[in-house]
Amino acid sequence: MVDFEYIMAKDFDRAWLNFELDLPLKPGKNGKANPFYINRPGNPIAELEDALLAPFYRPPKFFFSGHRGCGKSTELLHLMSNTAILEKFWPINFSIREEADIIDLDFRDILLAVGGRMFRDYRKNGGKLPEQLLKELNTWRGKVEEEVKTIGGLPVQFELGAGMEAFFVNAGLKMKLEPKTRSEIRQVFERDITGLISVINNIATAIYSKEKRIPLILIDDLDKPELEKARAIFHDRREIMMQPSCAIVYTVSSALFYSKDFDSIRDQAVFLPNINLHPRLKPTELNAEGYEILVRFVNQRMDINLMDPTALKEAITYSGGVFREMARIMRTAIGQARRRKTARVESVDVEFAATEIRNEYRRILEKEDIEILKKVQVDNRLENTDRLTPLLQLLALLEYRNGENWCDVHPVLRKLLND
């Protein structure tokens, strides 16, 4: 696969590519920020950077969240362009989707992924682990294989001859794709979870001894499992998830931040809010700073002459200050402008994009949802979160923070609610 080129669009074809919805921004060359990256004022990622760079007795763990589309993946990748972070840490970034079944996720799957990715990524980058550690890991591997065979009654093929790297690859793959084997391997780890944590810690210690940098694991897409799964991992098994002797940033579901279980991660929690486009209860009073951020979001990806200024302002308003929604509106509007064979995106194209999103919500919102949205549109209160959480996760409601947190309806829904 060819790497994506981060270059400003001079035509609609390139602009269409530049507003790809799932486009986390990889660090630029030589530790520089990605040319598409927007450093939002008051960015809480600075809080996370400061916490990572502060002195600590044990490698820290953080729980990073925010609403869908607010830029979490990009911010995690941006950490890897911070020279101070790179001097202190040996970073590894991956999506849990690559390593486990996101629908049936368990704390043991995550721990195996942490150990496996540390081992594989370090060796892939030319790192050499001590022979004694490799022998110990092979002994552990043999024990796991034997116990899985005992539980299942038949040997599980891990391609033994290829060693530990193949074990981590194949054990993770089987846990991701084979429910029966997944259950058997989890049973083995449940009996000896300290053994799995020791493997992680021994690999982390060996990397630190060689590199004089602490492994920093940045795990994306852990916010995708439903609330009950998130609760089971980060609340019920919190102490276990804090045990690895490497620094870890876990992404977690925003729903966990609205639940009573939030208290268990409060001290290490960082929330990435949406961009404020207006003050609370004043939807027609524009926040100039918020609009400027999203103007830059567009102008760093697309020639300014490809869009009418009024249309750009309207697109920003409809986005609600959510980066992914902004990209979605831009992409749909660009497509419509192309079909109209016009030279630039205009208001009619933006309105088409907003209508498309509104129609999607018409299909999924129920009468009770509409009543809740109407109430929030009037008072902007973030309360009764058990009722609001599903709407927040749908982005029908959007949370903002300027001092106290509050919420408002997605701007495309105003016409629906006012009909």
Image (tube, rainbow, N blue to C red):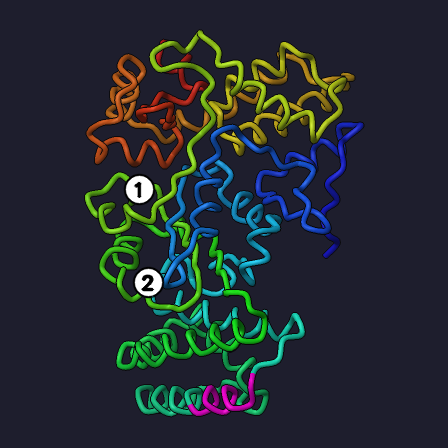
| Magenta-colored span | 130-139
Above or below, 327 relative to 169: above
Q: Nearer the viewer, residue 235 or 40?
A: 40
Dot 2 corresponds to which residue? 242
Which of the two discs, 1 and 2, labels the residue nearer the N terminus? Answer: 2
Report if residue 60 lies within the magenta region.
Answer: no
Q: Please name the amino acid that badge 2 sits on.
A: Met
Q: Please name the amino acid that badge 1 sits on.
A: Ala
Q: Where is residue 325 drawn, in percent x and y?
A: 52, 30
x 32%, y 31%: residue: 391
x 45%, y 37%: residue: 44
Dot 1 corresponds to which residue? 255
x 28%, y 50%: residue: 265
How dense is the environment of label 2, judged by Cα within 10 Å: few (below 14), some, or many (20 and up)? some
What is the tally of numbered marks visible in this picture? 2
Residue lying furthest top in this view?
284
- The disc at residue 279 is none
Q: Secondary structure at mark 1?
A: helix
Q: Nearer the viewer, residue 360 or 71?
A: 71
Calculate the distance from the C-alpha at mark 1 to the C-alpha at mark 2.
Answer: 21 Å
Does 150 sit left or right of 10 as displayed?
left
Q: Nearer the viewer, residue 76 or 330?
A: 76
x 32%, y 26%: residue: 405
Quadrant where the C terminus is found in the figure: top left
Residue lying furthest front in this view?
55
Quick check: can you spot residue 98? Answer: yes
Quadrant where the N terminus is found in the figure: bottom right
- Per the picture, the main secondary structure of the magenta-coloured stretch is helix
Does 108 sit left or right of 77 as displayed?
left
